[in-house]
Image: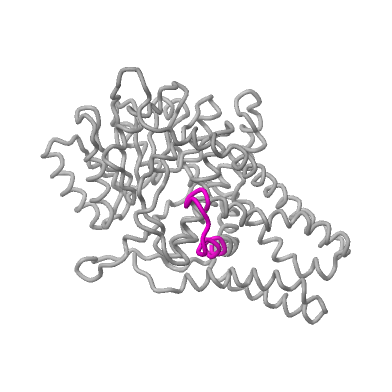
Amino acid sequence: MSLIITVLYSIAAAIGAAFAMMELRMLWRFVRNRRAIRAVVSSNGTRPGGEERYPTVTIQLPLYNERRAAEQVVRAAAGQEYPRGLFDVQVLDDSDDETAEIVADVVAELAASGVRIEHIRREHREGYKAGALTEGLGRSNAEFVALFDADFVPDPDFLRRILVEKRAFEDPSVAFAQARWAWSEPVRGLLPSALALLLDRHFFVQKPTRAFVGNVTTFNGSAGIWRRSAVDQAGGWSAATLTEDLDLSYRCALQGWQGRYLRDVPVVNELPGHMRAFKQQQHRWAKGNAQCFVSLTGRVMASRNVLRDRIEEAFLLAGYAIHPILLANVLLWPWAVLYMDRTAFLVLQGLMALVIVVAPVSFALTVHERDGSWNAGSFFQILAGVCVGIGLMVNNTAGQIQGFLSRGGEFIRTPKASHAGAVGAAAPRLYESPLHWTFFAEILVAAYCLAGTAMLVSAGEAFWAVPLVFWAGCLALVIRLQLTPHRA
């Protein structure tokens, strides 16, 4: 028993520490090169010299049951301050509710006003979002393709700013330009603050740093522009993974293409409207991440003369695996305290300390980079981010396991915050996020933590029971947030 626990806990601690070291390495690079990083991802104004060129662009809007957001994004896409003869809009509508009727009316109105716009309906959802994008590409001859999910609202100057003013594609090796996700209103409340911080860490710290040091810049599924030839050369969109954006980003990188991240080009969108919706989104990302790891890691490690840091790219592809590691640590903890050699246990705690420290440090740097300073509310935002992140370990572990065991899967929409509100005649069909089965698994793991706490206290190990209480609290927070009333 002692040997088995020691081996299992040592493996979990070593892998967790490896993930933490990679994150700390990235954070150190960010702190050391902060000014230079800002200069790279936040250039100002039009570059001097050169003739302005307006290439042809197709704007693709993949929709599925988005009656509350559809009209807004369609009008925003059609309202681009760009030569009308050089851009068109494809509304890729797979909806099976009243969204299709809403879109049809808006498209007819805009087409009558001179906008080149097409409402594309498929008889089936084969390939889900990737399938819809592929369908649209087959109808476009444009040099570039811009993508916006339903809850994104691009500014009227989006196309002109990226393609003309910033000349994002001046380098012929650039496959895509990714803008920063921004929120439509000030973020308030425990859940929105936590969700915003988890995503802002990616856009304010991780993504700019990776772009600066020459790692693979990944597309985030929306609010960006692709060079059509890069998509075609890499094999197009694939439904073999639920994270088709990550998959195509790496397939392009493996052929020598690069992505460009523009932090100072924000595109407003909405946060998930409820913890259940956020769990759906995270479960999909965790599953797709595992699918990409299975299909791409071998090719990444073999790309000796293409990718700058193959080890770091492999860790990024395995990013969501930190959640199974955290869950394994929780499940093994009471037995490790009771059965492991105490010296070996304490040595491994030194490794696990890296895992404990890295998240709050990363969140603290994000808050400062995003807000310009820390204040009294920063501590609570950081604590909320840490607790929600830990509380997702059961949900995301389930997604990872499913991703390792399967390919593709149904793309489930994520209800967003602004879609809540009207009922009755104004909303004949409600978009709801049902409780996922992992809700009950979270209850079981929380109960396990409390049982482990009682066991350790009765064995005279009350000090080492404290982490179990904290983990139970993180799970209880996520469980409680799933039970709050919601309509989306």
Is 294 left or right of 463, judged from the image as shown?
left
Q: Nearer the viewer, residue 170 or 123?
A: 170
Q: Is residue 96 magenta?
A: no
Considering only vertical position in the picture, is 288 above or below 145?
below
Which region is colored magenta? 368-384
Is 86 left or right of 207, judged from the image as shown?
left
Considering only vertical position in the picture, is 447 above or below 321?
below
Q: Residue furthest bottom?
A: 458
Q: Nearer the viewer, residue 247 or 403?
A: 247
Is 158 left or right of 302, judged from the image as shown?
left
Considering only vertical position in the picture, is 442 above or below 55?
below
Is 49 left or right of 452, judged from the image as shown?
left
Query: What residue is rendered at 86% in x and 59% in y?
Result: 344
Quadrant that contains the C terminus: bottom left
Quadrant that contains the N terminus: bottom right
On the image, the x and y values in percent for residue 278 come to 46, 60
Q: Residue furthest top?
A: 50
Q: Nearer the viewer, residue 50 or 62?
A: 50
On the image, the x and y values in percent for residue 205 come to 54, 45
Q: Is residue 372 magenta?
A: yes
On the image, the x and y values in percent for residue 106 come to 17, 48
Query: What residue is rendered at 23% in x and 35% in y?
Result: 81
